[in-house]
Each structure stands twice: as C-alpha cells, then as structure tokens.
Image (cartoon, helix red, strand yellow):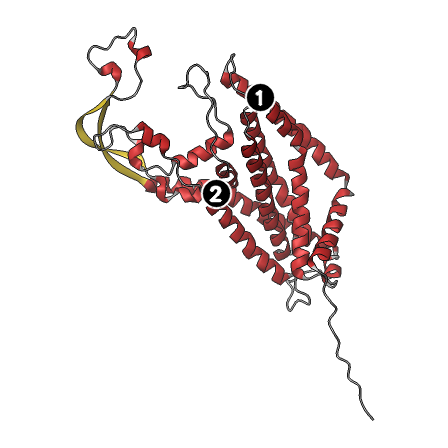
Amino acid sequence: MSTITETARPAQRLGWGAALGNIIQMELRQRLRTRAWYIMLAVWFVVIGLVTWGAVASFNTLAGDEMFFGPGRFVFEAMVGFVLFFGLLVAPAMSASTVSGDRAGGTLAIVQVTLATPGQLLTGKWLASWIAALVFLLTALPYIVLAVVLGGLDVAGLVVFVLMVAVELGVICALGTAISAIVPRTLFAVVVTYLLVALFALGTLIGFGLTAPLAVTSVPSNRAVYPDEEPGFDEETGYDSMDWSPVRCTGPMTSTETLDARSTYWMLAANPFVVVADAVPQPDKPPYDPDDPSTWAPDGVMTSISSGVRFLQRPPEMNVECANGELMDQDEIEAHDGTPVWPLGLGIQVVVAGALFAWARARLVAPAARLPRGTRVA
C-alpha cells in the first residue's frame, strides 16, 4: 500500500505593481470617505490665501511706494515656507497611524495573510500617505500661479522649490509609516513621529546654538579707518560722493573674537527648511532701483535661510575688518558662495528613514515569532 505525500506549495506572491496599486487604492478610499478630509483641505486653501495676502502686503511695505521689481519670488518663498511648515505638522498625523491604526482596528492581520509581502504592504501605505500629503501642495497651485503672474520668479527656481517640498513630505511620511509599524500604539506612534520631526526641524537649531560658543576663535586685527575720519573730508558732499567702506587699517594689532562655524554648520544640514532652501540656485538679485545697481530687492525667507547657511561657511577672517592688518577684499567675500549642504542633509534623512523602514518591515513579517504585550492580532 503506497502512501502519497503532497508537498504544500506556498501561494505565489503578487507583483509589486499589483500589490502597491491595491494597497494605495484601499488607503486612499478610506481617506476620501471621511468628511474631515475635505474640511481640512478647505481650511488649508483659505489659510494659504491669507499667507499669500500677508506676503504681498509685507513686500509692498519693504519695497516702498515705487516698486521696480515683481513680488512673485518673495510671495512664493513665503508660501513655500508655510507649506513646508504645515506639511511637517500634517504629514506625521496622516502617516503615523497607517499601520498602528489597522493593528488597533484588528484589520492588519487580515492584510498580512494576503499575497502582499511585508515590504509591499509598508511601501504601499507610505506611498498612499505621501499622495495624501501632496494634495495639500496641489491645493496651493492657484497661489503659485498668482506668484508667477506677479513677476520676479524664475521658472527653474519654482520647479526646484516644489520638487524639494514634495521630497521632504515624502521623507516625513516615510518616517511616520515606519514608526507606525514599529510602535504598537497609535497615539505613541504619532508622538514619536512628531518628536523625530522636531529633532530635524528644531533639534538641529538647538544643537548648533549650543555648540556656537565652542566655535568662537580669535583673529588678529587692528582698527579700520572710514572716509569721514580722513583729513579734508567734506561733510556736505562727502557722504554722497564716497563709497562707505574702510579706506585703510591703522593702529596696533589686537585679538578680536569671532565665530568660526565651519566645523559646526553641518548640524543644520538635516533641517527640512535648510534642505529645501539650499537646493535652489541663488537667484540674481534685482536692484531696488534700476538706475542705481547698488540697491537691492528684499530677499525671500527661503533665500535668506540658504544665504545664512552659506555665510556660516566663511573663514573667520572674512568676519573681521582689518583682519591681520589688511582690508577685507569685497570681491572675494562676494565670490565666496560656500558649499551646498542639502545633499548631506537629505542623505541623513534618507538613511534614518531607510533604517526605520528595514526595522518596520521585520515587524510586519507574519507569523510573528514574538508579539509585544497586549498587541491585538485580529
């Protein structure tokens, strides 16, 4: 009598395209069913409109009565900064409950036993939350068009700004989705995600500020002499006819303390605002008055952030007049652009998100060898 032994074959897994499509569709349908989603978008549209109006009013105040340049870039950068700020608040809430919410509702185990792999499940939920976050960026599109119409905005800068904001939203959603799979409690997952976002957005600033006293150095210098201190200076016409910069250095050499942030500025690289601002090429500053090239138009908030980070890369001698007994070379200072820091910052964010994603994937493998205490399976 013969015995027939049958070997159970594992079910064939779904392809990445089919699995991601099903998971994304399921996640987005759940979001679209809720009325709160549409209320939030309507409120966001009104708020971004108020921000745009405030940016235009601020620009008009800074520019004066006669405006020789368009306010488009100033308005757009204010809008981009606010969209990124709002995204840092909304993205964790939308992504940190994707897995832990299903676990609390008893539906995660049902999805885990389907033909989708843990990696596909995690990636699909991340992409769905990223798409939901991008809707807020698309809602601001009418105001972006308004900024273009107002003038002063280059198309290349506009495209890079929008792409980098979208990338940052994707990174934040990846962090939230991964933590949602790692932490069993939904509320705790949201809190941990907000703390991690705060570490990037505020912790980098705090770390740089705390280490600033350690980066103070001394530069030998003497006193700078200005045009009004020179013999024969005419007070009636001299202020209008002479360039107001030091003309020579004099006196004994003394030690002047100044900040040398070249060893600490990298702490700011992972800040989301620095990543977005520094990725955009520095625009040519239009003059405040076309007849006077020495005048300048006010910078936007993102351009100011990028310029500030590049400024921190200057050697300390450029911060002191008459350093080493020599006048500062203005042309050399203006030509010092610094090194872009956004690749380093984005790389740090991606590495952290990737490590959390690998940990989260391991937590979604079913059957689980060990479950946290009190975890609901189905």
Contact, CB < 8 Å: mark 1 with mark 2? no
281 and 185: which is toward the camera: 281
- Between the residue at mark 1 and the residue at mark 2, the CA separation in whole angstroms equals 28 Å
The crowding category of the residue bearing disc 1, from other C-alpha atoms within 10 Å (few below 14, some 14 to 19, many at least 20), is many
Point out residue 142 in the picture as x, y percentages from the top left corner.
Answer: 67, 29
Residue that badge 2 annotates: 342
Instruction: Pick out the residue farthest to the right.
Output: 1
Q: Residue at x 57, y 31 (%)?
A: 155
Secondary structure under the numbered disc 1 in the rendered image: helix
Kind of residue indicated by mark 1: Val
122 and 256: which is toward the camera: 122
In the image, 270: left or right of 166? left
Picture layout, residue 367 above or below residue 303: below
Q: Quadrant of residue 80?
A: top right
Q: Earlier in the sequence, mark 1 or mark 2?
A: 1
The C terminus is located in which quarter?
bottom right
Q: Quadrant of residue 137?
A: top right
Point out residue 284 in the picture as x, y percentages from the top left corner.
Answer: 46, 28
The crowding category of the residue bearing disc 2, from other C-alpha atoms within 10 Å (few below 14, some 14 to 19, many at least 20), is many
Name the disc covering residue 269, or none.
none
Point out residue 144 in the picture as x, y percentages from the top left corner.
Answer: 62, 29
Q: Nearer the viewer, mark 1 or mark 2?
A: 2
Point out residue 62 in the picture as x, y percentages from the top left corner.
Answer: 50, 18
In the image, 248: left or right of 159? left
Residue that badge 1 annotates: 56
Q: Residue at x 54, y 33 (%)?
A: 157
Secondary structure under the numbered disc 2 in the rendered image: helix
